[in-house]
Image: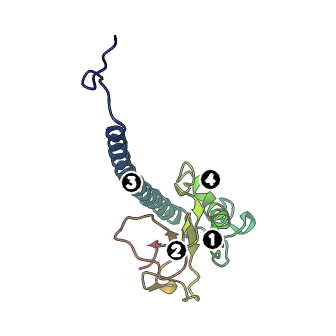
Amino acid sequence: MFNYSTKSIKGFTLIELLVVISIIALLSSVILASLNDVRAKGRDSQRIQELKEIQKALELYKSEYGCYPIASPNSSGASSLSNPCPSGTSALIGNNCSNVNNHFNNSLKVLVDAGFLPELPTDPLNETTASRDYCYNYTRSKPSQSAWTCGGVIRTEYDYSISFSVENSEFDLPLQANGKFDYCILGGRI
């Protein structure tokens, strides 16, 4: 009646299917790892670009008003167009990105109000991890304080700093000596 021959049945064996699936899984994991690295480098480049725009806006502000905006943890102590150069001390770095973002936004909102920036940027990740704060921190120096250093430069040698962290890129910028930020951009006297 029916004569079955092993040579006439076409298809893949279980072993062949498992080999193909494992090869596809290996290739996709390598591709995803490379893609994550490229994304991290893209976010790092975005950070640098945004902070350089802030630095330009700060210099324009100083040209217009004769000072840099004061760093303030609350809006009532921050610079405004009606009081562009208030006296006061630097804002402290918050213990998480929520606090740091409040300080940053309160301190630099005046750059948006003055038309030097369309809006204040936010770090692409905008999160606090165990070892890093992925947010931007602005500090205007108080000349009498020399404890804060950035790349070995003490506060008395610069007017402001913008601190930030990166994911895996290296930049030709001063390294933060300690704390939860990797790098800083210095401005003013140096």
**Kind of residue indicated by mark 2:** Tyr
**Mark 2 or 3, nearer chain start:** 3
Q: Nearer the viewer, mark 2 or mark 4?
A: 2
Query: Which secondary structure, mark 2?
Result: strand
Q: Residue 73: percent from the left, percent from the top?
A: 69, 69
Residue 81 in the image, given as x and y percentages of width and height: 65, 59
Image depth: mark 4 or mark 1 in front? 1
State the image coordinates of residue 12 (x, y, percent, origin top left): 32, 31
For label 3, the residue is: 33
- Indicate which disc, 2 or 1, sits on the residue closer to the N terminus: 1
- The amino acid at mark 3 is Ala
Calculate the distance from the C-alpha at mark 2 to the C-alpha at mark 1: 9 Å
Task: Determine whether label 2 and label 1 are within 8 Å by CB.
Answer: yes
Q: Residue furthest left?
A: 7
Camera-side residue of 97 and 130: 130
Q: Crowdedness of circle 1 by 10 Å Cα count: few (<14), some, many (20+)?
A: many
Residue named by callout 1: 71
Q: Earlier in the sequence, mark 4 or mark 1?
A: 1
| Residue at x 44% of width, y 78% of height | 189
